[in-house]
Image (cartoon, helix red, strand yellow):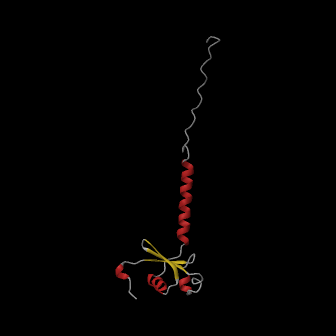
Amino acid sequence: MPSPREQPNPSPRPRRRKEPMPGPMPFILILLAFAFVVFLVYKSHSPPAADYNRVIKLAQEKQFARVILRGKTIVGEFEDGLADKQKEDLKKHIRNNSIKAIVPPAAEVSAR
């Protein structure tokens, strides 16, 4: 029998389980998933690129306020009010008062 001053060893408590994802990891994964969904939604709602030769023709007719080259893409920003005056088949390519086209390889570009 233990002496009155000695306490018997307490029963061992079950060990605490380690968290499966410690720290800010769940928040980072949720943020990445959200960014991926936003990217997919943005890509699915962007209009298809217009024909390169039509965009160049519009630029030669001086219908753009600015023309921007981004890598293999050309973006033309229409002058005020000119985007609404375009033909219906071209309007489906216009977004935010601008139109974009993919620049083809040099061999495919027609000189008109």
Quarter of the image where the C terminus is located = bottom left
81 or 106, which lies in front? 81
Q: Position of residue 90 (x, y in %)?
A: 53, 84
Which residue is at 57% across, 50% downward? 27
Q: Residue furthest right?
A: 4
Instruction: Establish if 43 lies above or below 32.
Output: below
Residue 85, quarter of the rendered image = bottom right
Quarter of the image where the N terminus is located = top right
Tell me: 52 left or right of 44: left
Badge count: 0
Instruction: Establish if 48 lies above or below 41.
Output: below
Q: Position of residue 39 (x, y in %)?
A: 53, 64
Q: Residue furthest left?
A: 107
Which residue is at 55% across, 38% downward? 18
Which residue is at 56% across, 55% downward? 31
Which residue is at 54% across, 51% downward? 28
Residue 38, quarter of the rendered image = bottom right
79 or 28, which lies in front? 79
103 or 58, which lies in front? 58
Q: Position of residue 5 (x, y in %)?
A: 64, 12
Q: Position of residue 29 (x, y in %)?
A: 54, 53
